[in-house]
Amino acid sequence: MRPATQDFIRQIVRDDLAAGRHASIKTRFPPEPNGYLHLGHTRAIWTDFGIAAEFGGVCNLRLDDTNPAKEDPEYVAAIQDDVRWLGYEWHDLRHASDYFEVFYLAAEKLIRQGDAFVCDLTAEQVREYRGTLTEPGRNSPFRNRSVEENLDLFHRMRQGEFPDGARTLRAKIDMASGNINLRDPALYRIKHVAHQNTGDAWPIYPMYDYAHSLSDAVEGITHSLCTLEFEDHRPLYDWCVDKVDLARHPELIAPLLDKGLPFEASKPRQIEFSRLNLNYTVMSKRKLMALVNDGLVDGWDDPRMPSLQGIRRRGYTPSALKTFVQRLGLSKQNSLIDFSVLENTLREDLDAHAPRRMAVLAPLKFVLTNLDEKHEETLRFANHPKDEAQGERNIPFSRELWIERDDFAEVPPKGWKRLVPGGEVRLRGAGIVRCDEVVKDANGEIVELRGWLDPESRPGMEGADRKVKGTIHWVSARHAVPAEVRLYDRLFSVANPDSEAEGKTYRDHLNPDSRQVVRAYVEPAAADAVPEQSFQFERLGYFVADRKDHRSTTPVFNRSVTLRDTWSAKA
């Protein structure tokens, strides 16, 4: 039985429950639907859903859809798909747009309390008035408008009377605060953009900090878990929750009751943890979007992308990702994780579970001349060397084989243990063979090997245990199925592609060898794979049947990860 996970957030939750602060735990995973989820989100998903489950609580999936200009239903569908693929199910599916009426009524309450005002400063003027980290800001000249004037202007904003950017509703907090987020931040802006859920009903939209805090309060969230960049926003989060005080003002949630949505007002506690940062990649949505839009990758589900859609197509498994983030744990300290840690976790997972198959990626024909031209037999191979429960499979064997071109050297380097002219190797599960002849074409290229199979070395024969230095894999040329194999590697060739040293950008660090396509041959049992089924291709690495393009008649496999780390030596 796996021991209980220990980290500072789980300890806070334990303490809160023990102290009776909450009868049950409720969390939420609140992505903005303006792009696809990526590897960095796995820690947040594991944290939000995992903590709720561990303590017998529930977790909502909430789409923070307050910026309709950048959001799309395509992203909403992908987010739901990704969360379910990782093995989690939400308690309620919510949208921040479900609460637009609540946010509006709450804003009117803030105006009446003297805690918010309508400001006519332009965005550039607001920046000038805000001050710096070392200098206080200045009050807006519109800060002292009367409650009546503010309400009138805010209502007219709501009616769509003013153009984009003409006015904002701002909180009235403290322009001298050392925390710039508290220097009268905007709560609403004018944006005449149709929303995917509400259509043209709203010409104004709430700002993220305001909408996020009140959404948590509306849903009865007990612990609002987020990454460290929101730590400086926590005072504003608490200010919004406290000043609106939904629990004591049920009139503000009347629109929810009209929609039949449950209301569980609470005072949520925001807790921050460090982001998941990996080298050899970028996880900025803006940069990932540019890679897609500029055709530098083949879409969001390109197996080189760090998007969850991409790594899923690459062959990463939910269990590997969960193990990865669990081992890293949660902390307040930002750190950069080496990509090899993630790859090793996948190797470990696939080594334990992935069936074995044989495939040849760079085919060279090897003809066993002492077998009859029509020779054909069936060999039995274990599907997994460490898991008898996976059973066995049939592999056809014939006179003509495909072997890896790299398993033969006409002039072998020092320490070579594979096939050479006149030398012997063991064919995996079939016996010992010798190379007697090298056949070349008119250009001097090797096109075929001819050799001899020792009949006394066949499985079950007296000479089966005869020692030879090397063992190679193969497939029967007569029975092998042609396949497209895509050899994926890291998308970037340097550990820190975000570095702009020497005037270079992340685009300059794209790895030209991150995708290579070869025409290969696989054993029939591999071709029969279903999409997203993973295998270890013996001696080559871990591969997955492509979820979009693979068919048993036209197999397509993606390399998930090599058998060993090939990048450490380059670093």
Image (tube, helix red, strand yellow):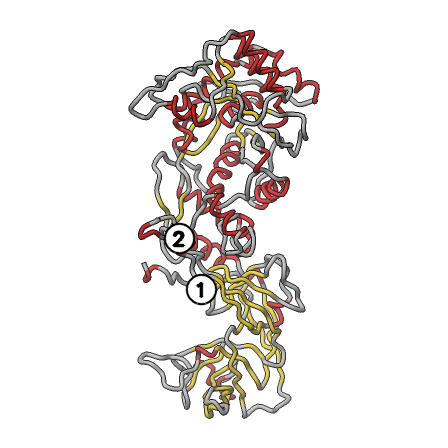
Asked whether the viewer can see residue 24, the reply is no
Residue linked to disc 2: 280
Camera-side residue of 442 and 259? 442
Is the C terminus in the top left, top right, bottom left or bottom right quadrant?
Answer: bottom left
Which residue is painted at 52% across and 47% down in the image?
289
Say what amino acid the circle numbered 2 marks.
Tyr
Identity of the residue drawn at 64% across and 88% down? 374
Res 157 quadrant in image = top right
Report if residue 246 is visible in the image: yes
Residue situated furthest left in the rendering = 134
Q: Circle 1 sits in a helix, a strand or a loop, which is it?
A: loop
- Residue 288: x percent and y percent? 49, 48
Where 321 falls versus 535 (above or below)?
above
CA gap, disc 2 to disc 1?
14 Å
Would residue 53 be found to the left or right of residue 499 on screen?
right
Residue appearing at x 40%, y 82% in the figure: 468
Dot 2, how many residues are within 10 Å of its Cα: few (below 14), some (14-19), or many (20+)? many
Q: Secondary structure at mark 2?
A: loop
Query: 117 above or below 274?
Result: above
Q: Are marks 2 and 1 in contact (CB under 8 Å)?
A: no
Q: Which residue is mark 1?
A: 513
Q: Nearer the viewer, residue 257 or 384?
A: 257
Disc 1 residue crowd, few under 14, some 14–19, many 20+, Cα 10 Å: few
Residue 199 at x, y percent in the picture: 68, 30
Q: Residue 399: horizontal and vertical position, in percent?
A: 58, 86
Between residues 314 and 452, which one lies in front from this camera angle?
Answer: 314
Q: x and y percent of residue 472 in the render? A: 46, 77
Instruction: Point out the tag, 2 or 1, that comes first from the N-terminus.
Output: 2
